[in-house]
Structures are given as C-alpha cells and as structure tokens.
Image: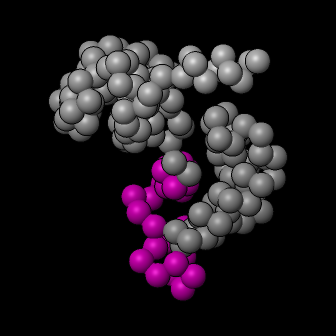
Amino acid sequence: MAAAKEILLRRPVAATIRLTVPAGGARPAPPVGPALGQYRLNLMAFCKDFNARTQKYKPDTPMAVTITAFKDNSFEFTVKSPSVSWYVKKAAGVDKGSTRPGHLTVTTLSVRHVYEIAKVKQTDPFCQYMPLESICKSIIGTANSMGIKIVQGLE
C-alpha cells in the first residue's frame, strides 16, 4: 500500500543538474544562472538556500551540488563536501599534483591527515555508511595517483 502511495506522490523530474559552486558564493550569474535558468527555476531561492547551507565552510571552497529540477519548476538539491583531491592538495600545501605520478613525488602526507580527511568525507550522503578504513584506502589511492606519498608520521 505504501508503495502505491509513493508512486502517486512522485513528481516528474525535468533534469538533474550537477555543478561545482564555491561555498557561500552562489550568485545568479554564470555558472549557476544559465544552468538553472534554462529549467525556469527560482535562482534567488537556490542562491539563498545554498549560501545558508554552506556558510560553515571557508569561502571559495568548491562544493559539489546536485540539483533535481521538477516539471512544476520546483527543485531539490544536495550539497556534498569538497572533493578528496582538493582536501589532499590543501593538506599537502601544493597547488597541483605530480606530472608523473609514481615516478615523481611532489610531497608527503601523514596518515593522520588522511584520517582527518576521511572523517570529514564520512559526513557525505554517499559515504555515511562506508567504514572509515575504506574511505582512508580510497584517499590513499587518490594521493598516490597525484604523486603524494603517504608516510606513517612526518619528521
């Protein structure tokens, strides 16, 4: 019975929009304006809601947002924390990774940094049920592919 009721209440989806917007920096200018405008969504409502949700992050932190636009011009959105590569670059203090990962090591990062990044990423909606160890292994793999070596402790 609940399944039939859920089907009747489901709204038709017009589009799913994925954007990367700086935290607290959503404005009705590009890239947000044209992406939402073509589906006739309320730009100011999105900007106010997004900026309110991301005010706890530092400004200019790139936030991934997935917007579900419905046919009745309403929308829902989920905000993910910044990407693992952004966190790894910030923790390592570099602007970009190695040009030859596996051959050139740009810098080193301690296991403690990896653990702290994993704790932040565990709050993501898609990672909340993953064990912390699995998230740490994924972060270590990302760091290795960027040419950043993971060490037990920094000297």
User: Toward which corner of the image does residue 126 lie, by quadrant?
Assistant: top right
Is residue 51 visible to the viewer in this orientation of the structure?
no
Residue 106 is inside the magenta segment: yes
**Quarter containing the C terminus:** bottom right
Is residue 151 visible to the viewer in this orientation of the structure?
yes
Which stretch is magenta?
Answer: 85-107
Residue 95 is inside the magenta segment: yes
Q: Residue at position x 61%, y 70% from top?
A: 144
**Quarter containing the N terminus:** top right
Please say if 123 is above or below 54.
below
User: Toward which corner of the image does residue 46 lie, by quadrant?
Assistant: top left
Q: Residue at position x 50%, y 42% from top?
A: 82
- 40 relative position to 109: left or right: left
**Residue 57 location (% of width, % of height):** 48, 28
**Residue 132 location (% of width, % of height):** 79, 46
**Residue 7 location (% of width, % of height):** 61, 24
**Residue 134 location (% of width, % of height):** 77, 55
Q: Residue at position x 38%, y 28% from top?
A: 69
Q: Nearer the viewer, residue 97 or 67?
A: 67
Outermost residue, bottom direction?
103
Please say if 139 is above or below 41.
below
Please say if 111 is above or below 16.
below
Please say if 12 is above or below 117.
above
Q: Nearer the viewer, residue 13 or 141?
A: 13
Q: Residue at position x 39%, y 58% from top?
A: 95
- 50 relative position to 4: left or right: left
Majority secondary structure of magenta residues: loop
Q: Nearer the viewer, residue 115 or 92?
A: 115
- 136 relative position to 10: left or right: right
User: Toward which corner of the image does residue 51 lie, by quadrant?
Assistant: top left
Q: Nearer the viewer, residue 110 or 22?
A: 22
Colour scheme in the image?
one colour
